């Protein structure tokens, strides 16, 4: 270090060098810790973002039914006999039955 008088602008002699910190210096200690923390934070944020995107925005993709390994928990088939529409939601149908009637030849 060197000092000077601001009125005369004459610099003093250099002082003895002083070293701060630990000796011998560790190589990459703080830098490696910082980089690993940034990578861990980035990975954690990405996983949280992907989970939230899949949970709230993602649309499930229909899968082909596996006939070899029958998974009874994911039965996507609809049994139409058990399907009944709510009141007022179904189509109104009128059914007519037609029979052929032959003319009788016997006189009454």
Image: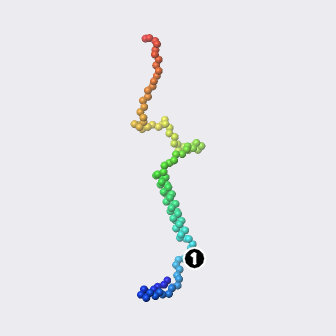
Front residue (pair 27, 7): 7
Residue 100 is situated, as x and y percent measured from the top left of the image, at 47, 21
Front residue (pair 15, 23): 15
Give the colouring mode of the picture: rainbow
- The extreme front residue here reads 9
- 88 relative to 30, above or below: above
Which quadrant of the figure has residue 24? bottom right
Residue 27 is situated, as x and y percent measured from the top left of the image, at 57, 72
Other-residue count near label 1 (Cα within 10 Å), few / some / many at <14 / 14–19 / ≥20: few
Q: Secondary structure at mark 1?
A: loop
- The extreme top residue here reads 107
Residue 74 is situated, as x and y percent measured from the top left of the image, at 53, 44
- Give the quarter of the figure containing the C terminus: top left
Count up the numbered dots.
1
Residue beneath disc 1: 24
Name the residue located 46 percent from the left edge and 85 percent from the top edge.
3
Residue 59 is situated, as x and y percent measured from the top left of the image, at 48, 49
Which quadrant of the figure has residue 85? top left
Name the residue located 41 percent from the left edge and 87 percent from the top edge.
7
Name the residue located 51 percent from the left edge and 42 percent from the top edge.
76
- The extreme right residue here reads 68
- 108 relative to 95, above or below: above
Name the residue located 50 percent from the left edge and 58 percent from the top edge.
46
- 47 relative to 7, above or below: above
């Amino acid at each position: 270090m060197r000092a000077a008088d601001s009125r005369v602008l004459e610099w003093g002699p250099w002082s003895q060098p002083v070293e701060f910190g630990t000796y011998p210096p560790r190589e990459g200690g703080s830098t490696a810790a910082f980089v690993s923390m940034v990578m861990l934070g980035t990975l954690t944020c990405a996983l949280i973002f992907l989970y939230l995107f899949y949970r709230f925005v993602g649309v499930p993709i229909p899968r082909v039914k596996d006939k070899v390994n029958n998974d009874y928990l994911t039965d996507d088939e609809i049994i139409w006999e058990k399907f009944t529409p709510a009141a007022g939601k179904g189509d109104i149908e009128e059914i007519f039955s037609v029979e052929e009637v032959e003319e009788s030849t016997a006189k009454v």
